[in-house]
Structure formats: structure tokens, C-alpha cells
Amino acid sequence: MNRKTKENIIEKALAACALITVLTTVGIILVLLVEAVSFFSEVSIIEFLTGTEWTPLFTNKSYGILPLIAGTMLTSFIAIGVALPIGLTIAVYLNEYAPRRFRKVVKPLLEILAVVPTVVYGFFALMIVTPFLKNFIPELAGFNALSPGLVMGIMIIPFVSSLSEDALNSVPDSLRQAAFGMGSTKLQTAFKVMVPAASSGIIVSAILAISRAIGETMIVAIAAGHQPRFTIDPTIPIETITAYIVQVSMGDVPYGTIAYKTIFAAGITLFVFTFILNNISYWIRNKYREKYE
Amino acid sequence: MNRAGYNRLKDKGFKIVGVSATLVGLIVLAIFIGFIIFMGMERLSWDFLMSLPSRFADQSGIYTAWIGTVWILIMTTLISFPLGVGAGIYLEEYGKKSKLSSFLEINIANLAGVPSVIYGLLGLEVFVRIMKLGNSILAGALTLSLLILPIIIVSTREAIRAVPSSIRDASVALGASKWQTIWSQILPASIGGILTGVILAISRAVGETAPLIVIGALAYVPFAPQSPLDEFTVLPIQIFNWVTRPQHEFVINAAAAIIVLLLITFVMNGIAVYLRYRWQKKVNW
């Protein structure tokens, strides 16, 4: 075999590897669509989108996805409520205040928060955080949205902090120097100049963190209970979209039944949410890149 | 106090807020892990590692679970390593600046953001049903490989990008073909960075639970798997199963199994961090 053919074959093989990622996307969309279309031939899409009861596994079946969406939003917003302020403060502190040595040690340590498997965080939420919170909120149920939300927030801190830090890092130093030159303190420079200048990057980090929280599965599957409720009360058991998919997968739901198809209908709802959020963040990031480079 | 003094005070105050924010997550995690060790350590024994699962908590072990995890680890590496590195090389060395490659890039960024449980749904339909692999190790490893492919591709590209173009130019000037340049110059120079990314990705796969539950990995597997087509369970699923039992003895089993899982995760991440450190030190272009 001559050199040219060999080079050609190698290039084709490498291209095939790259194309697998396209096949994966196509596969995900096709699988979700096919099963969801078959689901919606039996259940009206209006009932699905507006119904406030989700009981596909009971004898009295209802297929309103809103309770699952409410549960997902509730835990995600609690998580963001923890991760965004803490993550942003860390980013500002590490970028504007911290000595170099402190930064070098702390950054890899923070990454540990992101490498702990989520099933372990689920254990923490159920066995440690919920009993602890009961001391302060006696009416808190054993399964609730609050403690998985808080634990999820801790898990995504490094996610927010590293993305926000990248954003702050890419703000030109001249802005910082100008602020100092005008007599600003570090704090004023950080929050009145640097953070606004990096705002689009920080928004991206927040959006990606929300998307991560929406897709998080095991923490809520373990600690939030499996009771779909259309509520914003964080002290009672709820169910998220992801936890529902796990719940059905654990049971013996026969292939082809409508109960089996519900996990794909739930899956496509989840996919649409995260897909929109990811693309908004991708779009903002591209726009913002042009600004400083 | 005048205004400037007040501002300086606020400035000092933020330092304390900043340090506390940085440490709060780590302290909480340290408390959690301390709690787990306190709870599970006494249950951890040779018997616990070598026993099959049982209805009785005190006779139950994690033998099938950790064997399953090792199987998944090996199979996922074998599948995802060549595919991910191959795709990374293609995007960085061949497909640059074409319309296809910018499409591939957006696509990979999107895939990285797809929740893992969705990959489970993909694996359930494609590998378990259409390819008829059943709830086997192979189906699980294929699913997890697709899940971590974006991570491997991105880190491969970063490692290759760090190789200075002078090396590439010198090799081509000496008459080496494109592939010879990649194989003998680019890859040896970037292998440290590539391996770091691959190990981090595999350690993520080892901790994954949701996609494997969705493709039907079982909580109770009476025998250790013998081949890639056997049914299996993994440590995270075993932990999930024990956590959801009401009896306290099973929760203690879960804590002990978590110690083993965390050990595996931390060792893999430690190796990756060490490799990155060594590589960054050695490579001084």
C-alpha cells in the first residue's frame, strides 16, 4: 500500500470517530422523538403540558407534566440560590484578592466538590442534611426539595466559580488599573467595574449551572421522594423529571406500554429545557468573545 | 468615620467573606466524608469486599458490585479512548476551519450539556433493544462511552493545541507525512495531557449511576459477571439500592460501599492531577 492511500485511510478513520458525536446527537433526538410521538398518539399534548396531576403508574392515570417540572425548577432554583452567590464570591475573591499561592492550592481542592459521585451526594442529603435541617424546621418531611437542592448547590459551586473566574480573567487589566487610578478600593473595583465588565460570562456560568441542576438525577432520586406535586413548598416530598425516569427504570415496566413511553416523554421535556439553556449560553459566549479579543 | 475609611473597612470585610465562601463548600464536604467514615469504617472488611449480596445486611457484600465496576471501567476505557482521541486528533489536525468542524464543535458542546439520564434513554433503545445486547456490561460501557466522549475530545484537543507549531513544521520540513508527524511527534508530546483528560473522564463514568439504572443494570446480581455480555451491577447502583432501604443496617452497608467508591474516584483523580503536574513540568517549550 502506498503512502498516500494509507494517509487517506487514516484520515477517513479519524473522521469516522468525529462523526460518532453527530450520530449520538441524531440518535438521542430520534429515540426521544419516536417514543414521544407514539406517547402523544395516546395522550393529548395539551393534557401533558397543562395537567397538574402526574400519576401514570396508578390505576387512575393522569399525564400532566407540570408537577415534575415544578419539582425540577424548585430543586434547581434552591441549588442556584446556593451556588451562584458562593461561586461568584469565590471567583471575585480568587481573581481580585487572593495571593497566588492560596489560589494555586484552593482551585484544585474546589474541583474535588465536582468529582464526588452524585449518588454519594444523595446519601449526604438524605442521611445528614435532612436530619440536621429538622432541628430548625421541625415540619420538614424526611423527603423534601430543600436538602437535595442545597446539596446540589454545593456540588455545582466549582462549576460556577471556575466559569466566572475565566470571565473575570478575560477582562483587560487596563479597566482594573483605571478604576484603581480613580481611587476605588479593591471592592469597588471588583463589583462596580470587573463584575459588570464580565457580566455576560457570569450569566453564561449561571445558565450552565441551572442546566446542570435541571439534569441532575441521583441526589433528587434519593432525597426528594417520589411524589409528583404541583407545589413550591420545599419542605414536602416532590419528584423531578430525572427522578421519575429513574423511578420507572427501577421497576418492571414492560416494553411498549404507555408507562414505558412516559419516560421518553419526560426525557424529551428535559432535553428541550437543557438544549435551550445550553444554546443560549453558547450564543452569549460567542457574542461576548468578540468584545474583548 | 469618613467615607473613605468606611470603604476600606468594607474592603477588609470582603476578604473574610471571600475566604469563608471559598472554604465553606470544602468544610461541608469534609464533614460529610468524616461522617461517612465514622459510619461505614467498622463495616469495611475483607468479608464485605468478597461477599455476594444478600437479603441480610450483615452478610451482604460488594463483591459483584466492584467486579462490575472494574468491568465497566476497562470496557469503557477500551471503547472511549481510541474513539475520543481519534476524534480529537481529527478536529485539531485535519478538519480545522471547515464548516463541518464548526458544526462538530457546536454539536460536541451541546452533547457535553445533555443530562446523563438522557444518555441512558439512548442506550436503552439503541444498545439494549435494537442491538439486542440486553442489560449487559457491553451495553453499559457503550452508553457511558458516548457520555464521556465529549470530555475526552475536548481535553485531547487542548493537549494537542499546546504543542508548539515549530515541532509540526520541523517534522514536515524533514519530509514526514501528516500522519507520521502526528504519530511520532504530536502524540508523544501531548500524551500526558491526553491521558489526564481520559482518566478524569473514566473516573466520571465510574461514578455514574442514572444512565446505568435506565439501561436496566440490576441492583441484585447473584453472581459476578464472567463476560461482557453478562448482566451486572456497579458500586453506585449498589449504594443507591442500600440507601433506599429503610433498615439502618443497609444504610451502614451503603456508607461502607461509599468509602470504597470514593477511594477509587480519588485515586483516579489523584493520578490524573499528578500526570498533569509532571507533564506541565517536563514540557518546557
Image: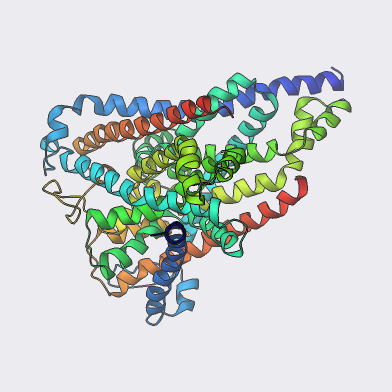
Nearer the observer, B279 or A174:
B279
Q: Residue furthest right?
A: A182
Occupied quadrant, residue A35: bottom left
Q: Residue at x 40, y 53 (%)?
A: B83
Occupied quadrant, residue B204: top left
Q: Is residue B245 visible?
A: no
Q: Is residue A284 above or below residue A148?
A: below
Q: Total marks drawn?
A: 0
Residue B161, percent from left and from top: 57, 43
Residue A68, percent from left and from top: 44, 61
Q: Looking at the image, what colour scheme do you see?
A: rainbow
Q: Residue at x 39, y 46 (%)?
A: A219
Q: Residue at x 37, y 40 (%)?
A: B203
Q: Is residue B222 visible?
A: yes
Residue B280, percent from left and from top: 52, 28
Left or right: residue A145 versus residue A191 is left
Nearer the observer, A201 or B100:
B100
Q: Is residue B14 above or below residue A214?
A: above
Where's the C terminus of chain A, which quadrant?
top right
Nearer the observer, A14 or A134:
A14
Q: Is residue A8 above or below residue A158?
A: below
Residue B99, percent from left and from top: 61, 64
Occupied quadrant, residue A59: bottom left
Where's the N terminus of chain A, which quadrant?
bottom left
Left or right: residue B256 versus residue B84 is left
